[in-house]
Image (cartoon, rainbow, N blue to C red):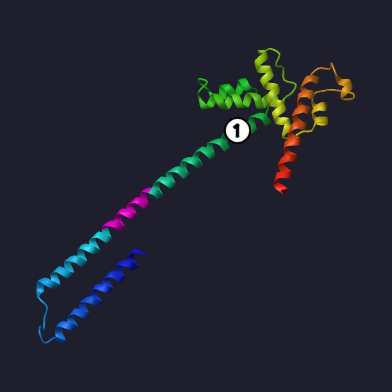
Amino acid sequence: MHVSRILVLISFFLACFSCCNGVFTNSKAATLAPSDTRNDDVTRFLRLYDTIETQLRINKTTKDEERVTSVSEAASLLGALALKVHGNLQQKLWLRFGYTPDQVLVILNAGSKEDARYKQYKKYFYSYFVKYLDEPMDHFPQRIIDNIWKARLHAWLETDTPPEVFTKLGLTGRWDDATGQKNYEYFVQFKERWGAKQARDYQDLIKLNN
């Protein structure tokens, strides 16, 4: 596009130059234009050409810088995504082979609570107790136990129904008759959350169809 503009300007200059030659040649008053006039025309054209060239170089440099920035940002995002995928894959493998949170903490060699590796360990800790329901946790503070159950209920909302969770929790008999059994309170919480989620999903479906 820029090259075409330059060619047009060159063609325009040559056309004007040829036209001037014709006038001066056929004119009786003068057979040749003064050299300084032609030099002025050429000088103006060259200045215009230099201006265009300079602008093109500036535009190219800007675009190159933008391109480098875009590539750098893309590489950074891809790198972060690769690390995230790698971390998720690691966690799945550790869960598959039953690594305890303590073992993973040693593997990660996590430092302070602000360390990314510690956050990865924390994520694995709750994932582990979501997967292994029989793992003892009575030795943890009540706050940690409550968080484990919250993590379980949150995960089950994406995969299970109330009957499935009822069985997972080791409850027996009819739902209403299971009152007083161990973990029944968590079944009630799940059932309420599951019902609320179904209502939200139904409302979202209605909005999409309207």
Of the 4 image quadrants, the one containing the N terminus is bottom left
Image point (33%, 66%), residue name: 3
Residue pictured at 49% horizontal, 41% vertical: 77
Question: Residue tagged by mark 1?
Answer: 90
Q: Which residues are magenta?
A: 54-65
Q: Amino acid at mark 1?
A: Gln
**Where is 73 relative to 166, above or below?**
below
Against 68, residue 31 (above or below) is: below
The percent position of residue 104, horizontal first and vertical second, equals 60, 24
- For residue 84, side relative to residue 164 (left or right): left
- The residue at 68%/13% (across/down) is 142
Rendering quarter of residue 137: top right
Asked if residue 64 is among those painted magenta in the image, a careful observer would answer: yes
Up-down relation of residue 94 to residue 137 (above or below): below
In the rendered image, is residue 99 in sight?
Answer: no
Quarter of the figure with residue 186:
top right
Residue at 60% across, 34% down: 88
x%, y% of residue 160? Answer: 77, 33
Under circle 1, the secondary element is helix
Q: Is residue 199 left or right of residue 74?
A: right
The percent position of residue 46, horizontal first and vertical second, equals 20, 65
Residue 72 located left or right of residue 180: left
**95 and 10: which is toward the camera:** 10
Categorize mark 1 by other alpha carbons within 10 Å: few (<14), some (14-19), many (20+): few
Q: Nearer the viewer, residue 61 or 168?
A: 61
| Residue 72 in the image: above or below residue 191 | below
**In magenta stretch: residue 98:** no
